[in-house]
Every structure is written in structure tokens, then in C-alpha cells.
Image (cartoon, helix red, strand yellow):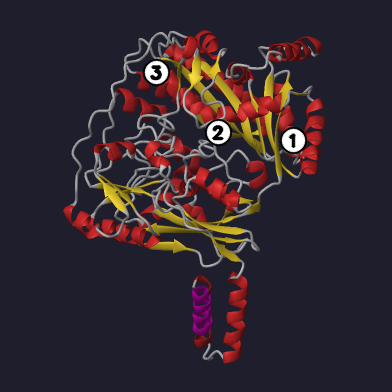
Amino acid sequence: TMQASHRDAAARRVASLASQFGESPQPVQLQRLNAAASETNGHRKEVMPEAPPKWSSELRQDGWGYEDTEFDIVEGEQIGLKGKRYPFSGMVFPNFRPWVEKVVGINVEDRAEVRPASRPAPPVLNAAFVEAAKGNYNRMSTSDRDRLFHGHGHTCQEVYAMRFGKLERVPDMVVWPGSHEHVERLVRLANEHDVCIIPFGGGTSVSGALLCPAEEKRMIVSLDMHEMNQIKWIDTENGLVCMEAGIVGQDMKRRLEAEGFTIGHEPDSLEFSSLGGWIATRASGMKKSAYGNIEDMLVRVKMVTSIGTIDRKVEVPRLSMGPDIQHMVLGSEGTLGVVTEAVIRLRPLPPASKYGSIVFPDLESGVKFMHELARQRAAPASIRLVDNEQFQFGLALKPKQTNPFAPIVDGFKKVYVTQWHGFDPLQMCVATLAMEGSPTEIARQHKVIRTIAAHFRGLDAGAENGFRGYFLTFMIAYLRDFGMKFHYIAESFETSVPWSNVLMLCEGVKRRVRTATKAAGVSQEPFVSCRVTQTYDSGACVYFYFGFSWKGLSDPVATFSAVEDAARDEILALGGSLSHHHGVGKHRQHWLQAQISDTGVAMLSGVKRAVDPKNVFGSGNLVGDGSGVPSHTH
């Protein structure tokens, strides 16, 4: 049926074109067209539909991830990881408690008293919209729990509000559409009845993008895309896959791998973030070196706006038809419409993969290595250079050993690196590797990487450190929430920067965080660390983690935000970007105009006013309602 509809549509297009030139298509022409259409679409495989994910109901309301997974004090007063979902779940980390108490400054004997976010105000319901919307969704809810869950993302400020304060404004209704047609009708009705829509993908935003504007008086509908989670088809010959925008990373990965394919996009939020969210934020993944960023993978996107649907008519590798409209969709952060479907480049699943790690005497040597690796185009699927603070962090998260010889082996490794090679334990850093390909290709990659590393005194540190480094990636938000139990507020943020400024930026931002926390009256030294992740010919992405004890502070969130802003000011002063892949949202709106110019803001505002004249998509992100960057933010 699908192939027949493609043929019929193609036949109609040719007939229409021919009629414009005063010609009628001959039967033989139509026969050739039908044969070509059949041949073109014959290698598109339909994928068995799958029910919406049930695990979404298992997610934590006031923090990251699953309800049954958390770091906490367990047996023997040690810190362990509860649950059964992850490689180290159910294990204890004997070195972690001493490390967090001594280095990070967390007092695990002093728990913060959680005061869950108060019940939201009664929903503001537009009766005409509610009635007209019936039959145009799979389900809807006005429950307090669903409204609260959809009213925030995952900045530490939002999580703090859920645990110790309140959200000023939350959605009035949550709606789960089941099809593109549902979305078109809901958006049309919202436009007719003056209702505000905020799209909701995985809910993993760390830019404040999901926060409802406090001043919004209209009914706010959270459009949860989770039930639009199908893989519609796989085109094996052209290397394409068509998916609905609500599919989340972990389900996409599992289902494509079962077919022998991957798209290779694996952000740190892979478990919970969605395809539509990746597109709306111009996302990047840890395997960018092998597969590119989301803009490199996107072939075709369908987005519903308040004046109609944007949908390019061809699935070609490149075209020249004026400015690329799809680039207005990429990074639009839910302000222009809602993404419903996308065609993405597809790659065969690599036959093998391998972790690795390389230790360097200091961060400067590691950065030089990363730059040379990028210059030679020799980076593996993923490579991350972590500084000494994060290296020590990873070591502290080593689970309890069951092998009686492990301490002897670890001791030998330490002597080998620190005494034989003269590495200072308080300066050394490590690069973690994830390599993919055939066993022969992986061996060749590893050899090239080790050869380059040797020029910068790099030493092979084995697969275990590499695996543990990537495990830490998926644990970092759980660890942030662990700290919040004990009066400790922390967050990560990222930037991109030219190679010439990478080391200077790493050192400058750390210094600025320390001086800003002291000036803000924080009594303890903050923890601050960085890692260099995605690499490019001309620069790299740099991630920072920082946190401090809020004990004794009258307004922890305000203090944290002031320090975070100081760090962002330092990043911009040292040639870094406002964001590499997290987006702007409302969290970084304050700096947008200075970064893209008055003219740039005018261009974005013009598009917003033209595509969404009634501000149906009124999240307030980027340029707000189209009248310019909102002044109320920050």
C-alpha cells in the first residue's frame, strides 16, 4: 500500500508538470514512471510498530532518570548505586565517600530536608479548545503530577525548585498526540482559540526551555511527543531512516541495532532525549567524530507551525534552493513549531567496538594531543580528555573489587606511571576512547592514536578506564542529584572554542568560578573540573562541571546562578561560544543579542513573527514572541 501511494503521488506530479506544458503523458511514459517509482521504493523496509515506552512512567519527578536508580549511603556507610539498570548498579564504591568528603566538600551526615514543590495552581482551561481538541490526541491529562513533570527541565535551578521550592507556572494540560495529523489539528485549534503550546520531547533540557513564562495568561498545553515513537521505514540502498520525532534515543538505538543499523547519534542524554529534541536544539553526540552532529545527519524534517507544515519534498544528499529552510528548524527550540517526523542518514552497525584510554602528564600535553589528532583526522568514534579533577573523580568511582589480586595490579600501575615515568598524580589527566569498525580497523586506529600520543608523553592506560569514563557520562546527573541531598548544588555547562584558546579557557573559567564563589560568600572551595570532548579542525567542545555547598546561604539558587553567569562571561571573553549543543532557551538568553548582533536578532524575530504571528509557540525561548530578546529573563 505504501509503495502504491508513492507511485500514485509520483504519477500525479508528472501529470501535473506535463499539463503545465500543454502535454498529456502517454501510457508508455506512465508505465516507465511507475516502474521507476516501484524500483525506487522497493528497498524501503517497513518496521514493525512498537507501543509507546512504558518506562516513561518510571521516571523521577524531581530529578534525573529512573525512580529506582540513585546514589545513596548503603551498606557499611559507603556510597552505592541503587537499582538494577546499569553496569555498576547494586555495587558500592569504597573510595567515593572519602573523596567527596575531602575533595568535593559534601558532608554525608547532613541531609537536606526535602520540601517537594507545592501543588500547582488550578489549571487555566480554555473550554472551547478543550472541547474542540477531543478526538485529536491519544490521551490528555490535567493532573498535578503530569503538569509538574512537564513544567520543568533539568538545570540544577529547576531540580532545586522541585525539591525545595516551587515552579511559578506550569502547563494547564498535557496532551499526547498519536500522529502528524493530530498535531496539525491541535496547532490549528490552538491558533484559533488563542492557546499556547510548548512542545515536550524527552524533558532533558538544561537551558530552561521548558519553563513556562510566569506572565503567560493563556492556557498552556504541553505537547508530549512520546507516543509518536515509530520507525516508519528503513531505506537500505540509500542509507536513510524515517522516524517520528517522539522516539527517544535508547529505543531508537535498540530498534535500529536489531535491524543491523545505527545513526550514531549518542548524546549524554541518550536514554531519555528524543529525536525531535535533538533537532530543535542542534544537538551533538559523543560519537560526533565518526557520524557528525545532528545537522550533518538530517536529510528531511517535517515541522508543524501555526500557519502550516514545513516539509521539503525530496530526500537528497544536498541541494541549492536558496537558504536552507531546514536550518531554521534546527535550533528553533520549540519557538516556531513542533517537529513531527524526520529522515536521517543511516549507517551499518559496526561489527566491533573497543574502549581504551591514554594517560598524559598534564592537561597541556593532553590538549596538544587532541589538537594533533584532529589535525590528522585520526580521532576515533569518541574521544574525551578529562582534567585531573575529573580523572580523580573517575578513580573514586571504582567499584569494590572482588579480585584479590586487583589491588596489587593497581599498585603496580601507579608505580609505573608516577615513579617510572615521573607523572604527578595531581597533574595527570586521561583521554578515554571509544573505537568502532572491524577488528582490523580498530587495531589500526588504536595504533595511530598511540603513536600520536607518544609524541606528547601519553601512555596506554587500558580499556577499563575507558569504559568507566563512559559509564560516568550516564551517571553525572544522578551524581548531581546525590549532592543535592546534602546541601550541595552543582551543574555542567559547555562551550566551543578555537584550539588556540582551549587551554587558556579551561584555566580561566576554573579560576573565575573560584573567585566568584568566594566573592558570593561561599565558605568552602568549589569543585570545578573540565573535559575536552567533540573535536573539529579549528577547535573543540569543552565541558565544565562545578558545584559548592550551599550550607549557610540565604538563596542558594541565586548564588549559583551568579557564579554560573560569571563563568559564562569568562567563556565569552576568552573566545568561547554561548553554547555548543545545549541551546539557548531562557537560561542563556541574556547574552544572545551581543553574540549574534542586533541584525541577527531582527532576522530571528522576523521569522518568528511571520511563522507564528499569534505566538502559539510561546515558550519564550530565543527571541520570545518575535519582538526581540525578552528583558525579563536572567
- Percent x, y for residue 129? 22, 56
Cα distance in 3D space between marks 1 and 2: 20 Å
Residue at 54 percent of width and 9 percent of height: 98
Up-down relation of residue 66 to residue 345 (above or below): above
Cα distance in 3D space between marks 1 and 3: 41 Å
Our reading of the magenta stretch's main secondary structure is helix
- Percent x, y for residue 291? 64, 47
User: Quick check: is 534 in the magenta stretch?
Assistant: no
The first of marks 1 and 2 along the sequence is 1
Q: What amino acid type is highlighted by mark number 3?
A: Lys
Residue at 39 percent of width and 29 percent of height: 63
Q: Tag 2, which secondary structure?
A: strand
Q: What amino acid type is highlighted by mark number 1?
A: Leu
Residue at 41 percent of width and 37 percent of height: 589
Q: What amino acid type is highlighted by mark number 2?
A: Thr
Front in this rendered view, residue 268 or 253? 253
The range drawn in magenta is 4-17
Front in this rendered view, residue 96 or 169? 96
Name the image quarter holding the C terminus.
Answer: top left
**Location of mark 1 (residue):** 373
* Residue 490 appears in the rendering: no
Residue 500 occupies quadrant: top right
Say few, some or many: other residues with alpha carbon within 10 Å of mark 1 (under 14 / 14 to 19 / 20 or more): many
User: Quick check: is 10 in the magenta stretch?
Assistant: yes
**Location of mark 3 (residue):** 485
Left or right of 501 in this view: 523: left
**Location of mark 2 (residue):** 495
